Image (tube, rainbow, N blue to C red):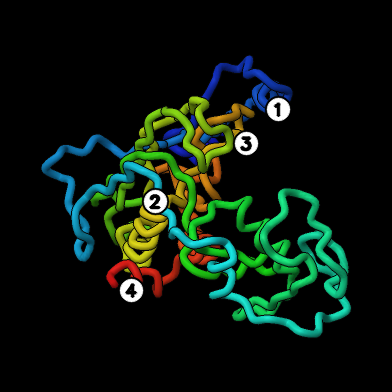
Amino acid sequence: ATNLVKMMPENSVRPPSAAPGITGILMSAAGLPVCLTRPPKLVLHPPPVSKSDIQAIPGISHTCRKTTKKQAKKGKTPEEVLKKYLQKVRHPPDEDCTICMERLCAPSGYKGPQPAVKPELVGKLAKCGHVFHLHCLVAMYNNGNKDGSLQCPTCKTIYGVKTGTQPPGKMEYHIIPHALPGHSDCKTIRIIYNIPPGVQGPEHPNPGKSFTARGFPRHCYLPDSEKGRKVLKLLLVAWDRRLIFAIGTSSTTGESDTVIWNEIHHKTEFGSNLTGHGYPDVNYLDNVLAELAAQGITEESLAQEKD
């Protein structure tokens, strides 16, 4: 027993002989030491950081971005938008249109407000080659954000520049002098999102109705590495295109008409990973790059933003 006591870690907790739990009682009865492991702690935020310790990120201008209003529409009709991305199909294949589920060789089965397109016309998307009724594509476009872009409903290929419906807010970003778990060789990029509550616009689920904004400001973290800075640059593009947040129903609380994340995952835990939203996570940077690409945001987008 004496040797076992010496082998115990210095930070172990040794309760009295009446330790709770069957295991503790049996070990105490046998004269053996009882070692209880402390549960890991949730560490959401870094140690305090003074203003003088905060640094701008090299290669990225400014330390703050704001979105104040909805992006301007392209001013083109749905037919004009689709014409840029489609090729005419004179002899439709003998298969279903995956929008209305009617055969492509038959008229469109769409029953909603009727677009100004003949229901029997068929077109093929130029990049991915998927074929649909023009009638169905126009209806799908009219039910979306109508921003001049189109996303193939079959393979999700994006045509044009996809934008979202994120409400107005502010995104701050800078370097703090602390390292993330798993990234001890570099400092940390801290992102702070702040979106106030407001009233929904015409592009939102319930125009004219107020929306809530819970949990703001939201603090997020990236390693200040080459790949971490690349992710930040792409997140800035996503912010400018209003793709980081949306208004919808919270998957955690069930609250509707509230600001929610929009399919681009962020790390909100600084010094632990108890919730799955922290570090270490060796796959996170690659995963978020894939999520950004699914929104049409890649390194080519950085060049487009400069043009």
Task: State the residue at coordinates (54%, 20%).
Answer: 15
At label 3, the amino acid type is Ser
**Upstream in the sequence, badge 2 or badge 1?**
1
Q: Is residue 21 above or below residue 259?
A: above
**Cα–Cα gap, marks 3 and 4:** 35 Å
Q: Quadrant of the N terminus?
A: top right
Which residue appears at 22% of the width and 58% of the height? 57
Crowd class of label 4 (few under 14; some 14 to 19; many from 20; radius 10 Å): few
Distance from label 4 to label 1 (Cα)? 63 Å
Mark whose residue sits in front, 3 or 2: 2
Q: Amino acid at mark 2?
A: Gln
Q: Is residue 178 above or below residue 233?
A: above
Q: Determine the secondary structure under disc 3.
A: loop
**First in sequence: mark 2 vs mark 4:** 2
Closer to us: mark 2 or mark 1? Answer: 2
Q: Is residue 298 visible?
A: yes
Q: Earlier in the sequence, mark 3 or mark 1?
A: 1
Q: Residues within 10 Å of mark 3 (few under 14, many from 20)?
A: few
Instruction: Return the mark for residue 303.
Output: 4
Residue 23 badge: 1
Badge 1: how crowded within 10 Å, few (<14), some, or many (20+)?
Answer: few
The quadrant in which residue 51 appears is top left
Q: Nearer the viewer, residue 81 or 276?
A: 81
